[in-house]
Amino acid sequence: MKKRIMAGLLAAASVLAVAGCSNSGSGSTNTTTAAATTAAATTAAAGNDAAADTTTTAAPAPAAAEEGGVFNIYAWNEEFKGFFEKYMPGYDASAETLDGIKVKWTINPSDNGVYQDKLDQALQANASAAADDKVDMFLAEADYILKYTDSEYTLDVSTIGVNQVPTEYQYTVSAASDANGKIKGVSFQCCPSALIYRRSIAKEVLGTDDPDEVQAQLDSWDKFDAVAAKAKDLGYYMTASFAETYRVFSNNADSAWVTGGELTMPAAISQWIDQADTYLKNGYTLTSGIWGDEKNAQMFADGKTMCFFGPAWYFNFCMGNAQDPEKGCSGDWAICKGPQGHFWGGTWMLAATGTDNGATVAKVMKAFTENEDVCEKLIVNEGQFTNNKTVNEKFANDPSFGSDFLGGQNATAVFCGMTDSIVWANATIYDQLLNEGLQTYILDYYTGNCSKDEALQNFYGYINEKYPAIVTP
């Protein structure tokens, strides 16, 4: 029997001082701030002030020697919290303590920059905060990690005993490094993103569901577009969202969104807009957003969509409809590289300046990157692709290891073959709201509410509001 992967700063505009953003960043994800080229103004949480903090608190337990009594962690969802509580060595779930130190989580949603705003407030106050209120460690995504790595609010983790190890993927280290090469954090994930396709539909459209053969027919955008036309003729959608391929294009951009304080749309983003125009006009896709209900409904067994895109976290945590025991189609899926290699997202752990729990921060960082037992559990129990090459390759080379959801396919082996395609370049501190904002405003054009030019002007107006220092077209 195969082993199976288990399915399953301020509201208006506060400022974080940033030490310069010349890092070789990635064109795949997020950020926030502004003040000429090197400063940063965080996103307004307009309309989202109601998204109050969700915290887990309790009376502090006796602290370990020389460490603070409360270990404060900031995050935007409960994914890592769940991993921490299940797998962190030394964690006592009943007492909510790690080595006798009370663990407190502060969780705010990432939508519209709310998480960053709340985090920025806390980081700015860290120096004067009471010991039990100091931020010790916080999580950041690729789309805005530069905002924090290139700031005075994060520590060079070598000062707490964390150094780069050869089992980490280099792009995850580059993403967490400041402009001077100092490493400010570590990621527990590596996130190569794959083309996820329905086997049954691929058999009808391509004549095969074999991943290698499917890849051969979808390994360029020209081939992908040709197959989209064929799928339409057979009554299928190629994708279920006009934004489905956005991350593939943005992650392969050869220029940054913002250079010298001016916003210039990368050529790859313009190419994506052209593709979205064509796909919607020809009926190859739907007007649903990337997280829209209409798109998600296409994951059910009666869905008519062949292709989705995402990393391990996506099909394990965001394709619940496909795994629905009654209406889903678990097992009728497979993955391959697709037209272009890319990555999507990822979660980095950063050490906050002013932490009084440096040794504890270091222990957590090492546990989720260097501890092979923890990393193995993330793969087997959680379907993760970890930031530990040795552990990933162990499962990639295990012929008995596979995923029920993917019809027995070994996703870890596929992802191991895709890591060389990951490019960390052209990231800026503004990427989160630029990426999200463009998709939001261009949808008004696709749904017939305005012209394309009007949609783009509305997008530029949004950028002017969020980042007044950026010069827009």
Image (spheres, helix red, strand yellow):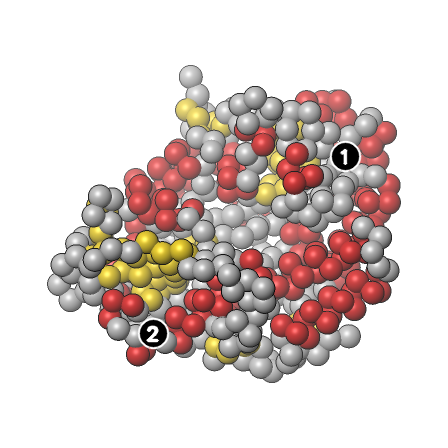
Left or right: 371 as drawn, with respect to 210 = left
Query: Which residue type carries mark 2?
Result: Asn
Left or right: 157 as drawn, with respect to 181 = left
Whether label 2 touches label 1, CB < 8 Å: no
Which residue position is annotated with label 1? 237
Task: Work out whether 353 lies above or below 173.
Answer: below
Left or right: 113 as drawn, with respect to 72 = right
Q: Looking at the picture, tell me which residue is in the foreground, 464 or 386.
A: 464
Residue at image location 68% in from the left, 51% down from the top: 246
Query: Which residue type carries mark 1?
Result: Tyr
Query: Mark 1: few, some, or many residues within 10 Å (few <14, many ≥20)?
Result: many
Residue at disc 2, secondary structure = helix
Q: Is residue 219 something that shows in the picture?
A: no
Q: Quadrant of residue 336?
A: top right
Task: Work out whether 411 lies above or below 34.
Answer: above
Percent position of residue 386, x then y: 42, 45
Q: Quadrant of residue 227?
A: top right
Residue at image location 78% in from the left, 30% down from the top: 236
Residues at marks 2 and 1, CA–CA distance in whole angstroms:
50 Å
- Tag on residue 80? none
Query: Which of the two discs, 2 and 1, sits closer to the camera?
Result: 2
Percent position of residue 410, x then y: 50, 30
Residue at image location 84% in from the left, 64% down from the top: 453
Percent position of residue 72, x then y: 31, 61
Task: Work out whether 301 lies above or below 185.
Answer: above
Q: Looking at the picture, tell me which residue is in the foreground, 354 or 62.
A: 62
Query: Mark 2: few, some, or many residues within 10 Å (few <14, many ≥20)?
Result: many
Residue at disc 1, secondary structure = loop
- Tag on residue 126? 2
